[in-house]
Image (cartoon, rainbow, N blue to C red):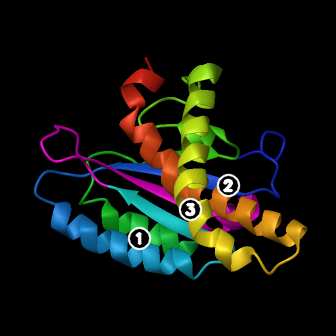
Amino acid sequence: MSSSVVNRNHHVTAVITHRVRSGREAGYEEWIKGISADARQFDGHLGVNILRPQPGHSSSDYVIVLQFDTCGHLDGWLNSDIRKGWIERAQPLIQEKETIQVLTGLEGWFQLPTQPLKAAPKRYKQAVLVWIGVMLVSLLVTPLIAPLLTPLPMLLRTAISVAITVALLTYVIMPQLTRWFQRWLFA
């Protein structure tokens, strides 16, 4: 990750793909628990999501979506001796070397781990999915939090509401919408 390409002071997501050997899934699941626990101890760690292979599909790819507050903190984790030790332990469990994609902007909302970064969906499709995502938050979450925020000043209410919306879109809604609409989105 070059600082000329990536703004090192912004939220960053690493999408790591491992193709797990047949019959080694249970060992890999244990490995994921261990490495995830260690990653959480690093400065700037914001969260980790694991996308497991779909039952009935031929793919054995596990995708780890790892988020840090800055590129520097992500670099610290990716280059740490602790992670290197975990990667060495994973070698008997995986078929080939891991792939790592680093996403620093909204492209992470629309990037499937198996798609190259240059295959971004058309902007109108991105706009439609963002609209659906914002509508879901507006219709389902806003009525729940509005009564709690009523006593607060308008600026603070708005700031909290927007923060909740962005967090839900980034970590929950957009990843799910991207999976559900992937055929249309990437056609």
Task: Label 2: state its secondary structure.
Answer: strand
Residues packed near mark 2 inside 10 Å, few (<14), some (14 to 19) or many (20 plus): many
The residue indicated by pointer 3 is 141
Image location (x, y in percent) of residue 117: 57, 30
Image location (x, y in percent) of residue 157: 80, 69
User: How far is mark 3 from mark 2, CA to CA?
Assistant: 26 Å
Q: Is residue 152 magenta?
A: no
| Position above or below: 74 against 31 | above
| Position above or below: 147 against 57 | below
Residue occupying the point 63% across, 29% down: 127
Image location (x, y in percent) of residue 114: 41, 35
Q: Nearer the viewer, residue 97 or 12?
A: 12
Residue occupying the point 89% across, 67% down: 155
Q: Is residue 64 magenta?
A: yes
The kind of residue tagged 3 is Val
The kind of residue tagged 2 is Val
Residue occupying the point 38% across, 47% down: 97
User: How far is mark 3 from mark 1, CA to CA?
Assistant: 39 Å
152 relative position to 105: left or right:
right
The residue indicated by pointer 1 is 86
Q: Which residues are magenta?
A: 52-78
Going from the N terminus, do you reach mark 3 or mark 2 first? 2
User: How far is mark 2 from mark 1, CA to CA?
Assistant: 21 Å
45 relative position to 62: left or right:
right
Q: Nearer the viewer, residue 182 or 39?
A: 182
Image location (x, y in percent) of residue 164: 66, 64
Image mark for residue 12:
2
